[in-house]
Amino acid sequence: MGSGSDVWLMAILALLVVVLLWRSFSSWLYRPAPFKPGIGFEVNERIERTPSVDLLEQRGYEVVSGKLKVPLAFDCDEQLLYSRLFIDYVAHKDGEYFLVKEARDRKPVDWTGSGVRDALLPYLLLYPDCEGLLYINGEINEIRKIRLVQDEEY
């Protein structure tokens, strides 16, 4: 092999290394962040004192994060569409983490299988490492614990 072919071979190898490094850097840069505390999710340390926080603490939960905004982007026929989901709190009890949603008068949940699916499934699927979701109705001091489980009969 002549010295000219050595230069070409080294140039091709260097170019290959640069392309591989760029691809791994790009995939690292755009990778979504994991959610759980201790596993790297961002927390909002500003926790507003509300009756819901008091109710959670009375029931033995520790509120570890205030309101979170989860940005979403959808590629629809090569057009980017943007939206977001809001999580009111993240609570912790007995080593388990729960997303928390507060009841809203303008957006009531129909407590049937399809109603819970339509209203709350995106939250349960978004962060599968969380144990479930706590739905708080502060007007009647009620906390509902919702977990996604498999039905063996289905």
Image (cartoon, rainbow, N blue to C red):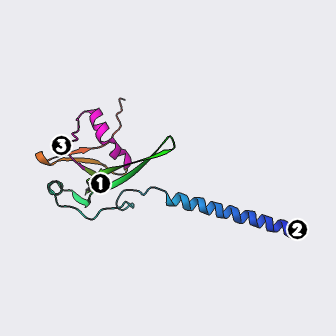
Rounded to the nearest angstrom, the CA distance separating label 2 from label 3 is 79 Å
Residue occupying the far bottom of the picture: 3
Is 109 a magenta residue? yes
Magenta stretch: give its range: 101-126
Q: Residue at x 21, y 56 (%)?
A: 61
Q: Which residue is mark 3?
A: 105
Please tell me how crowded label 2 is: few (under 14), some (14-19), or many (20+) other residues with Cα within 10 Å: few
Kindly identify which numbered label has been placed on residue 96: 1
What amino acid is labelled 3 in the image? Asp
Image position, residue 131 (x, y; %): 31, 49
Residue 132 or residue 122, whichever sits in front: 122
First in residue order: circle 2 vs circle 3: 2
SS for callout 3: loop
Rounded to the nearest angstrom, the CA distance separating label 2 from label 1 is 65 Å
Image position, residue 43 (x, y; %): 32, 62
- Residue 89 position (above or below residue 106): below
Question: Residue 65 vs residue 57: left or right?
Answer: right
Image position, residue 27 (x, y; %): 53, 57
What amino acid is labelled 2 in the image? Gly
Q: Residue 140 is drawn in which quadrant?
A: top left
Residue 131 or residue 3, whichever sits in front: 3
Kindly identify which numbered label has been placed on residue 2: 2
Quadrant of the rendering where the C terminus is positioned: top left
Kindly identify which numbered label has been placed on residue 113: none
Residue 67 or residue 77, whichever sits in front: 77
Q: Residue at x 51, y 60 (%)?
A: 28
What amino acid is labelled 1 in the image? Glu
Q: Residue at x 51, y 43 (%)?
A: 78
Residue occupying the far front of the picture: 79
